[in-house]
Amino acid sequence: MTTLHPRAGALELERTRCCICETTDADPIAVGEDFEYRTSADSFLAVQCRRCGLVYLDPRPTTDELPQIYPDNYHAFSFSEERFGLVYKVRSRLEARRVLAATKGLDVRDIVDIGCGDGFHLDLLRSYGNPAWNLVGVDLDKRAIEAARARGITVHEGTVESLDLPAASFDVALMIQTIEHVSDPPAVLRATRELLRPGGRLLLVTDNTDSLDFRLFRRRHWGGYHFPRHWNLFNPSSMRALAAKTGFEVESLSTMVSPVNWTYSVRNLLDDWGASRKVVDRFSLEAAPALAAFTAFDALHNLAGRGALLRVFLRRPA
């Protein structure tokens, strides 16, 4: 089993509720640990709303605990070719096509990436998109912001709800693997909607709880729980409910192939069972063979609309 992070300790937790239905009418579905980074010795409870199907952490860490549960070696703070090698090259090509799809059919001048991390996706837009585009990021973590600015990306420090950015000033917003990390998804989407010009588009990518990997590993080891960092997790139905609650129109909702949750689900299971470090490390974001195998496997499920990730295009009504 992985040893605890040097700064690991008991976390301050707070009770919460379904962010869509605003009730606590939910069933416990999983108990797990921070298998990936061991930032805490705590166990965490995931519950599912009986009304809309949202899966959420209850209780969850307070926002004061963010520096502990996101350690310095967190992958989104430094996703680089030097660290990830072939995985970085392959993902860059795939992600470039995906983010460029958010611009199709629009007269684009300004793009904002909410929860931009180290600026990976904005860097892809700069490399493969229109040089005239104005690219801006928003992030809360100083370590991520420092890494993004080192790439030459303009980043605003804070949350999209708290920053005083000009209303109706962006044509496209990206929110890629972000919404599951925030405490109040409706507030984040409402604030994003206000930033978009009428007819502007939001590309939202997040984990899918209507997937085979979720069904197989949901009781404890599912990689999408990312205990204790993923606070709200969606299926197609709850995502549509979130869009309706926040004044967005759903342009399209589909699933995407991703090997990450498959890889981490197996990794979490092996780690929990006390497998050797050598075996566990064969299943990680740096393990190209495992990622390749699960990419092919998830592609079959994606054909049936059950891919590991949701990809949602939302539009601010014109």
Image: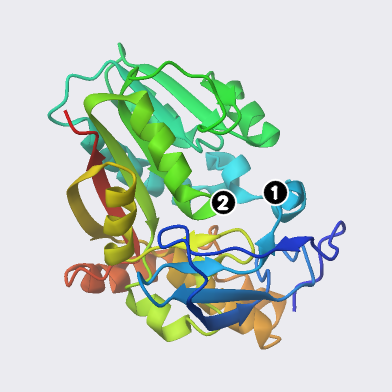
Up the image or down, 272 lies above or below 249; here it is below
Furthest toward the bottom, the residue is: 273
Q: Secondary structure at mark 1?
A: helix
Furthest toward the top, the residue is: 132
Give percent across and percent down for residue 284: 56, 64
Residue under the image location 62 percent in, 81 percent down: 31
Q: Secondary structure at mark 2?
A: loop
Up the image or down, 21 lies above or below 147; here it is below
Q: Who is closer to the viewer here, 155 or 24?
A: 24
Residue 183: mark = 2
Residue contact between numbered discs 2 and 1, judged by CB atoms under 8 Å: yes
Q: Quadrant of residue 253?
A: bottom left
Quarter of the picture containing the C terminus is top left
Give percent across and percent down for residue 54: 41, 67
Residue under the image location 30 percent in, 58 percent down: 241
The colour scheme of the drawn protein is rainbow
Residue 22: mark = none
Q: Quadrant of residue 10?
A: bottom right
Up the image or down, 284 lies above or below 130; here it is below
The residues bearing labels 2 and 1 have C-alpha atoms spaced at a distance of 8 Å
Q: Who is closer to the viewer here, 49 or 270?
A: 49
Q: Amino acid at mark 2?
A: Ser
Is residue 135 visible in the rendered image? The answer is yes
Residue 63: mark = 1
Up the image or down, 216 lies above or below 289; here it is below
Q: Who is closer to the viewer here, 1 or 34?
A: 34
Give percent across and percent down for residue 260: 45, 63
